[in-house]
Image (spheres, helix red, strand yellow):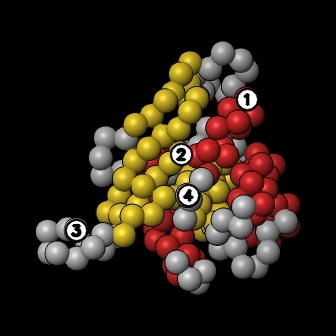
Amino acid sequence: MNRAGAHLSAMKIVVAGGSGTGSTTMVRSVSEIRPLHTEEPISGPAAVAGRTVTTVALDFGRITLDQRMVLHLFGMPGQDRFRFLWDPLLDGTTGAVVLVDTRALDAARFAIDCLEGRDTPFIVAVNDFGGPFRSEDEIRGELTLGPGVPMVEFDARDHSSSKFVLIALIKHLEGHAL
């Protein structure tokens, strides 16, 4: 219960995508607590030029949206070699955000397939890396997304932008009868 005596509703939200799409950055930018992160130096070729660290287990943060709702955010590791962690991290997930980089749309495929296979509601958030412009129709077509999957643009470095993505996810979840 919160101070006013109302019950808080906690939701487990997963932030997923390919390596370097911004899940760690998003969790850090929006978390109201000091986020837990498990970054280590990259031991092989980096998916993104100039990147020196990668998430090896998960990121964790928390944000209270209002007096009734708190979100527990779990940033998923993006590298292929850590995908064995996804099943246990996805257990109990209420909803998810799939991060997309327009320079490497295919990197989101694994996350989308996992979430669809579990019937986990998700939205797609296109992170602004200054890559090539891709229309929403082009992104939807390449990722084979149906019209029922919301898509938003954002900047993972910006608190307000990341919060906007989470609010869009909550609105989508409301349509799935939480």
- Asked whether disc 3 touches disc 4, contact meaning CB atoms under 8 Å apart, the reply is no
Q: Residues within 10 Å of mark 4 (few under 14, many from 20)?
A: few
- Marking on residue 10: none
Residue 69, placed above or below residue 19: below
Residue 161 x/y as whole percent: 45, 61
Alpha carbon separation for disc pair 2 and 3:
26 Å
> What residue is shown with label 1?
81
Among the two numbered marks 2 and 1 on one chain, the one whose residue lies closer to the N terminus: 2
Q: Residues within 10 Å of mark 1 (few under 14, many from 20)?
A: few
Circle 4: residue type:
Gly
Check disc 1 and report its element: helix, strand or loop: helix
Alpha carbon separation for disc pair 1 and 3:
40 Å
Which callout, 1 or 3, points to the residue nearer the camera? 3
Which callout, 1 or 4, points to the residue nearer the camera? 4
Quarter containing the N terminus: bottom left
> What residue is shown with label 4?
92
Alpha carbon separation for disc pair 3 and 4:
21 Å
> What residue is shown with label 3?
1
123 to the left or right of 10: right
Residue 102, placed above or below residue 4: above
Among the two numbered marks 1 and 3 on one chain, the one whose residue lies closer to the N terminus: 3
Alpha carbon separation for disc pair 1 and 4:
23 Å
Circle 3: residue type:
Met
Residue 162 x/y as whole percent: 46, 59
> What residue is shown with label 2?
75
Q: Residue at x 49, y 73 (%)?
A: 170
Q: Residue at x 55, y 58 (%)?
A: 92
Residue 174 x/y as whole percent: 53, 81
